[in-house]
Amino acid sequence: MRESLLDVVLLLAVVGLVSGLARRTGLLAPILLVVAGVAFSFIPIGPEIHLEPELVLEGILPLLLYIGAIRTSLPAFRSNLSPIVLLAFGHVLFIAAIVGLVLHAVVPSIPLAATFALGAVVAPPDAVAASAIARRLHLPRQVVTILEGESLVNDATALVALRVAVSAALGTTVTWLGAVGQLSLSVFGGLAIGGVVAMLAMWLHQRTRDALLDNTISLLTPFVAFVPANYIGASGIVAVVTCGLYLGHRRDRMFDPAARVQIDAVWKVTQFLLEGTLFLLVGLQMRSVVDALASGWQLVTAATVAVVATVVVGRFVWVFPGAYLPPMLRLDRAHHAYPPWPNVVVVSWAGMRGVVTLAAALSLPLRFPGRALLVFIAFVVILVTLVAQGLTLPAVVRLVGVGRDDPRKDLLAEAEVRQDAMRAALARLDDDRGDAPDYVVDRLRESAEIRANQVWERLGNPDREPPTETMRRLRLGMLDAERGVFVKARDEKRIPEEVLRQVERELDLEQLMMARGRQEDDDS
């Protein structure tokens, strides 16, 4: 027990140190964590921690998928549904098929069903890797939505394909009708259960105004969706994603401001620790994966190179026709314009595999044909796609000239809506003022106008500090001075600790309201 606790503390410490190093150097934290894990796996005094597939697939993955889903824009997901479906279903099955055929051609001693199982394992790009890397690079919003939408759903397709392939490899009779039935139950059953759980969670959230209870319900929700879906043979992943998309779209109706702030903070810390730990654990498996291999490195190398090349090239082969054929055939009526080719290149190159691929490989039965080789190949696919493609993705983005979303366009849209919001607020103020003193009403009116004008100021001269920014900067300095006086008074025993805590909370809340924080994506 003491050793296990020490391992957990060591893992979290390494996650914090490596993530801090990544921020200081500008490198991507997932890549550094995997590399650090590989290095630790070959150090004699390093921790020997084996990745449990059930813990990842049933304990950690639902949480991370739910976090990703509640932060995904449902309107954006719907508007990009065609490319997401083509990638989440078509691409996964295509890669599973061609990897299976290629590996069987290179290593004929492994049955075709077993090689298809490896294809299903390495087919889905990882949700955690896609979100962590795509947003960190500030890719266009549509590209991020497609990559995240694909990775949220594709695990369900891959795990159903894996289940069918494993059954066939172990001698169970599998028919095409049965496979289609499993996939249909997986998707539609997951959609139904996810929708029901989302309604139940929303009902509960709307009837509590306790931020702690809201947090508890929110943490339990992904498991409430995942467990029953898995129990009936449906996809727990689809259930969690469906639930998360629905609740994320309606969070403004479910939570009061205190609950929203607290829940966002809880999810942010949870995501940071779980993502970092998973990437580190992937690297730590390197030694055990290599040790499980027998001799015959020439064949191992040939099979590994063939599969890695098939995975990387196969994504280009699928993505480019999938991006241009639907508009050409007018099948995609919502997006019949051709997407910019640099965006298609980035989507093709951003096929990073991650912990789900490794967990699925490790879940193969011990008596599975060629298991040690299949697990090793899956691990190398993760390393190449995550480390090599992840490291070179920024260069690819620059090379092909992917344009960022125009921030001025967003600011202009925000400014227009803020004007509408100000008019609505002032109308409500006039209706509710009653016998309120004029100076109170004038102050509220002035405050509303200042907030509405902030965005217009940011659209103005970029070389000059806007007046509201000057006011914010000066007020933050005043708050710091006030806080220092109260701390000194506490130290001199002029006020008790309780008074300091109360005032400190008031000052902190005002500072949070005034400070223009960075976007969540910059912190990930």
Image (cartoon, helix red, strand yellow):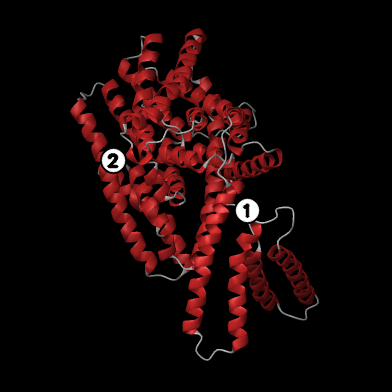
Can residue 223 be seen here?
yes
Q: Is disc 1 surrounded by few (<14), some (14 to 19) or many (20+) residues within 10 Å?
A: few
Nearest the viewer among 428 and 189 is 428
Mark 2 falls on what kind of element? helix
Percent position of residue 275, x then y: 53, 42
Residue at the image position 58 percent from the left and 25 percent from the top: 388
Amino acid residing under circle 2: Val
Amino acid residing under circle 1: Arg
Residue at the image position 42 percent from the left and 47 percent from the top: 76
Q: Is disc 2 surrounded by few (<14), some (14 to 19) or many (20+) residues within 10 Å?
A: many
Nearest the viewer among 222 and 125 is 125
Q: Which residue is mark 2?
A: 187
Residue 456: name its quadrant.
Answer: bottom right
- In the rendered image, which quarter contains the N terminus? top right
Q: Which residue is mark 1?
A: 518
Residue at the image position 53 percent from the left and 70 percent from the top: 422
Q: Of the numbered discs in the image, which one, if any, rests on residue 427?
A: none
Nearest the viewer among 211 and 291 is 211
Mark 1 falls on what kind of element? loop
